[in-house]
Image (cartoon, helix red, strand yellow):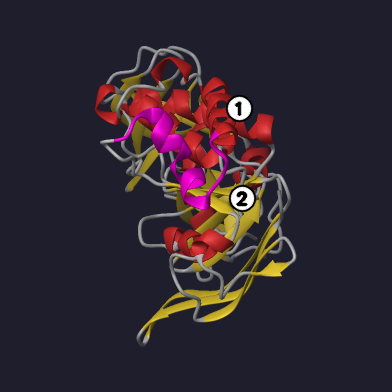
Amino acid sequence: MARVTVSGLRKSYGATEVIHGVDVEIADGEFAVLVGPSGCGKSTLLRMVAGLEGVTAGTIRIGERVVNGLAPGERDIAMVFQSYALYPHKTVRANMGFALKLRGTDRAEIAERVDRAAEILGLTPYLDRYPRQLSGGQRQRVAMGRAIVRDPQVFLFDEPLSNLDAKLRVAMRAEIKELHQRLRTTTIFVTHDQIEAMTMADTIVVMQAGRIEQIGAPLELYERPRNRFVAEFIGSPAMNLLPGVLGPEGVAVEGETLPLAAAGAAAPGAEVVYGIRPEHLELAETGFPATVRVVEPTGSETLTYLRFGAREIVAVFRDHHPLRPGDRVHLRPRPERVHLFDPGSGLRL
């Protein structure tokens, strides 16, 4: 195992720079998730760590070694791709042991490592099958097993769950997290799904347009987003963001005064963006008025889309409520859960 340190990393394709001076350190044994919208540079960053993309500027260290000039096979990493990349004409056993065979590892050691990885991943009954005889989840386990047998310093996962159905993705999330807890190998996992990031990561790295917006533990990013982008991206459904003006008793939005516990550095009269997560809005006798547009009961909670003046907002209620489109309700934000952002810079106030 080893820490991964990225310093001043840049990547350009011709005159177009796509990674803009990224700095991040992933501790030994940590599970770090790179998350962000499509095109933000997270997969490019991962491929640079793997050696599949060249570095325009900056350094990548795995442990104490600078690996910029090393080929992928010399970096002591193992990568799991979205496409599984299994050899269709080879059995599960042969797929898992192929990299070791190319390395010239003794056959007995290959067999021992493959059997151990298969036991960890529940693949022992399938070792003599071919990929076409496996389900999507089983194929993903084989791809993970092929990485495990190499006993690398770092695991790299590039959106490995994207091809799975929703139920299987949830199951595989738990399996990958459990695997990491057992092996404690430094892991970098790329996804565009912030739910995957929140449930799997020790540390989340939020990226946008080739830059890092915030690094922190999942709940840290959820409870104290550094800026408006992180606030919108982390959390599902996304945070409600309402432009308003700070007053002595709260923030004026759509003719109503919305409460808050603290104004931070903002002064009365300042334009602000009032942020409140859907689950921090409560039905109340008194509060700001809103009209129900769509109700989505999920069993454990009720997801409700509403109109507040000219604004569209979302609320999540933990209890069952007999709401119907067109109903007029009053909502009360929890003041201690309110976030304020600067409308120009987007930074948290």
Residue 75 visible to the viewer: yes
Can you tell which quarter of the image residue 75 is in? bottom right
- Looking at the rendered structure, the kind of residue marked 2 is Val
Q: Nearer the viewer, residue 339 or 225?
A: 225
Residue visible at 67% across and 29% down in the picture:
182
Residue closest to the far bottom: 15
Q: Taken as a whole, is the magenta stretch helix, strand or loop?
A: helix
Relative vertical location of residue 302 with respect to residue 104 in this rendering, above or below: above
User: x and y percent of residue 209 in the render?
Assistant: 43, 68
Residues at badges 1 and 2 in contact (C-beta under 8 Å)?
Answer: no
User: x and y percent of residue 254 in the render?
Assistant: 42, 49
Q: Would you call the spot at circle 1 few (<14 residues within 10 Å), some (14-19), or many (20 or more)?
A: few
Horizontal relation, residue 210 to residue 348: left or right:
left
Q: Nearer the viewer, residue 85 or 322?
A: 85
Q: CA distance from mark 1 to mark 2?
A: 16 Å
* Pointer 1 residue: 178
Residue 127 magenta: no
Residue 343 visible to the viewer: no
Residue visible at 46% across and 51% down in the picture:
242
Magenta stretch in the rendered image: 90-107
Residue visible at 50% across and 71% down in the picture:
344
Q: Secondary structure at mark 2?
A: strand
Mark 1 vs mark 2, foreground winner is 2
Q: Quadrant of the C terminus?
A: bottom right
Relative vertical location of residue 217 with respect to residue 173 in this rendering, above or below: below
Counting every numbered tag in the picture gives 2
Q: Secondary structure at mark 1?
A: helix
Residue 95 magenta: yes
Horizontal relation, residue 135 to residue 50: left or right:
left
Q: Nearer the viewer, residue 299 or 38?
A: 38
* Pointer 2 residue: 154
